[in-house]
């Protein structure tokens, strides 16, 4: 059984909805990648009579309604790369979630559902913490040195399908 993660090609400004301002922030752009939901699946029985998830693919998407750029903002490559970092962090968290779900083997379908929900909540919380730390350290892309450190860390983690941490935070 394998759980795969599918990501969009590199993002472009066409994904961003132009707005006068982004509510509750001074950011010039905001991407809203979404932790994918688990499709409606039928659990499989293992040779030992336990239950596990079947093979499937997570597709990491973007909520276009909440992906915005301020009309007066400069659509720079640096700003787009910062927003790509937000998306890539969720891809990394989704990979970690997929690995955890692949290892689940339990006694009942109900237990499988409980562990699936718990894993999803854990990784959703991790995604939010990573996202906040990324923006805090990079000052929403304004701190170039911090942004470069994160870019390097994200690139390295994406290259390693078994990455479990980034910036000393769990995925």
Image (cartoon, grey):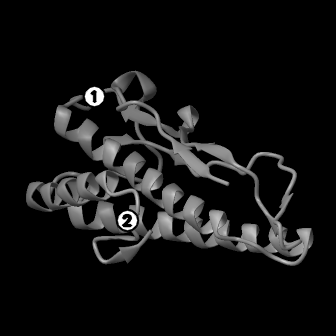
Q: CA distance from mark 2 to mark 1?
A: 38 Å
- When the figure is inspected, residue 165 is found, relative to residue 148, above or below; the finding is below
State if disc 1 and disc 2 touch (CB < 8 Å): no
Q: List the residue tagged with mark 1.
A: 72
For mark 1, give the secondary structure: loop
The structure residue drawn at horizontal position 89% and vertical position 71%, both measured from the top left corner, is 49
Q: Secondary structure at mark 2?
A: loop
**Closer to us: 35 or 114:** 114
Front residue (pair 89, 46): 46
Q: Residue furthest front?
A: 47
Residue 3 in percent (x, y) is at 62, 52
**Residue to which mark 2 is pinned:** 163
Rendered location of residue 70, percent (x, y): 35, 33
Q: Residues within 10 Å of mark 1 (few under 14, many from 20)?
A: few
Q: Nearer the viewer, residue 127 or 5?
A: 5
Report the disc number at residue 29: none
Q: Is 145 positioned to the left or the right of 80 in the image?
A: left
Q: Quadrant of the N terminus?
A: bottom right
Is 86 situated above or below 101? Answer: above
Residue furthest to the top in view is: 14
Q: With 67 as the anchor, is 153 left or right in this view? A: left
Q: Is residue 66 left or right of residue 150?
A: right
């Amino acid at each position: 059984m394998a759980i795969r993660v599918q990501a969009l090609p590199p993002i472009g400004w066409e994904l961003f909805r132009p707005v006068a301002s982004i509510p509750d922030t001074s950011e010039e752009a905001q991407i809203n990648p979404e932790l994918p939901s688990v499709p409606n699946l039928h659990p499989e029985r293992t040779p030992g009579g336990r239950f596990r998830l079947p093979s499937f693919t997570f597709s990491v998407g973007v909520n276009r309604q909440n992906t915005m750029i301020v009309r007066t903002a400069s659509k720079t490559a640096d700003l787009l790369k910062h927003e790509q970092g937000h998306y890539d962090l969720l891809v990394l968290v989704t990979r970690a979630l997929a690995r955890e779900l692949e290892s689940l083997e339990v006694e009942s379908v109900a237990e499988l559902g409980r562990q699936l929900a718990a894993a999803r909540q854990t990784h959703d919380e991790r995604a939010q913490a990573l996202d906040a730390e990324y923006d805090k350290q990079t000052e929403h892309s304004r701190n170039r040195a911090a942004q470069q450190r994160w870019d390097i860390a994200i690139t390295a983690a994406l290259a390693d399908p078994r990455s479990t941490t980034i910036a000393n935070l769990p995925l």
